Image (cartoon, rainbow, N blue to C red):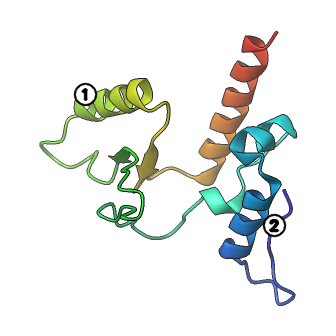
Amino acid sequence: MMEADHEDGSYDRNKELKLLDETKAGVKGLVDAGLTKLPKIFVHDGHKVNISSSSSATNVSIPVIDLGSLHEEGNSRHEIIQKVKDAGEKWGFFQVVNRDFPPCVLDEMLVGCVDFMTKMLR
């Protein structure tokens, strides 16, 4: 997928979202096309995400897993694992916010997902 960069080198997230939408292939289309790196539109670095926002137009709330409090006292790793399990079983996907791991981990996770899908389709 071509990144939506301006001539001055700045990144235009809305333009890249529009380009993805225009393909009508979605995320599966990116994987089918041989995507090897997570596109910028799916990476939010350097800031906390407001998890209270939701789409009022569709009245649908995608499961959100907040990892920001993972290492604070009183928060259970087991609770977060349970939330991931529940979201995966009920929705098949979820959004992770306030994570504290480098983007290369996302790239490695993408490679693992592609490998898994490739094996499933054989």
Q: Residue at x 78, y 19 (%)?
A: 118
Q: Amino acid at mark 2?
A: Glu
Kind of element beneath mark 1: helix
Q: Residue at x 73, y 33 (%)?
A: 111
Relative to 29, say whether 100 is above or below: below
Q: Residues within 10 Å of mark 2 (few under 14, many from 20)?
A: some
- Report, in whole angstroms, how far the alpha carbon at label 1 lies from the one at label 2: 37 Å
Kind of element beneath mark 2: loop
Q: Earlier in the sequence, mark 1 or mark 2?
A: 2
Q: Residues within 10 Å of mark 1 (few under 14, many from 20)?
A: few
Give residue 64's position: percent from left, percent from top.
36, 48
Name the image quarter holding residue 105.
top right
Q: Which residue is mark 1?
A: 78
Give residue 67's position: percent from left, percent from top.
35, 48
71 or 111: which is nearer to us? 111
25 or 105: which is nearer to us? 25
Q: Residue at x 36, y 50 (%)?
A: 61
Position of 43 with respect to 80 (left or right) is: right
Relative to 2, say whether 64 is above or below: above
Name the image quarter holding residue 120.
top right
**Quarter of the N terminus within the rendering:** bottom right
